[in-house]
Image (tube, rainbow, N blue to C red):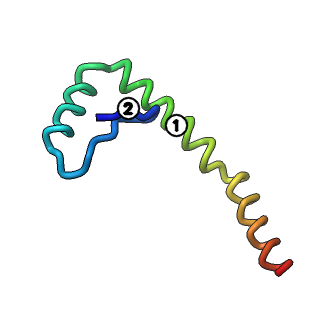
Amino acid sequence: MLEDRTGLVVPERRPDKLARALCVLAGDRALVEAFGRAGRRRATESYDHRRQAARLEAIYDRLIAG
């Protein structure tokens, strides 16, 4: 089980590892809250509508410039 700043990462098709990760989360409210804050921060930074619009505009500019 690896710890990402927004959650726990477990290998696919490993129910034993998933069960362990869930037990860790069930027993550590502070960790769950920290993951939640980090996830909200990541979503805000990565999916801000202004940032996405600027990226799309740059793509269109490159296509038009050809």
> In terms of secondary structure, where does tag 2 sit?
strand
Residue at the outermost left position: 16
Q: Give the percent coordinates (x, y) of residue 47.
A: 60, 50
Residue at the outermost right position: 65
Q: Which residue is mark 1?
A: 40
Q: Give the percent coordinates (x, y) of residue 8.
A: 34, 35
Residue at 41%, 24% in the rendered image: 33
Q: Is residue 22 above or below residue 47?
A: above
Picture quadrant of residue 56: bottom right
Q: Is residue 40 above or below residue 34?
A: below
Residue at 50%, 32% in the rendered image: 38
Q: Amino acid at mark 1?
A: Arg
Quadrant in which the C terminus appears: bottom right
Picture quadrant of residue 61: bottom right
Picture quadrant of residue 23: top left
Camera-nearest residue between 42 and 4 = 4
Q: Is residue 32 left or right of residue 14?
A: right
Q: Which mark is residue 32?
A: none
Q: Is residue 55 above or below residue 40?
A: below
Q: Amino acid at mark 2?
A: Glu
| Dot 1 crowding, Cα within 10 Å, few <14, some 14–19, many 20+ | few
Q: Give the percent coordinates (x, y) of residue 41.
A: 56, 35
Q: Which residue is mark 2?
A: 3
Give whichever of discs 2 and 1 has the lower sequence position. Answer: 2
> In terms of secondary structure, where does tag 1 sit?
helix
Q: State how far apart marks 2 and 1 are (Cα).
A: 17 Å
Residue at 76%, 58% in the rendered image: 54
Quadrant in which the N terminus appears: top left
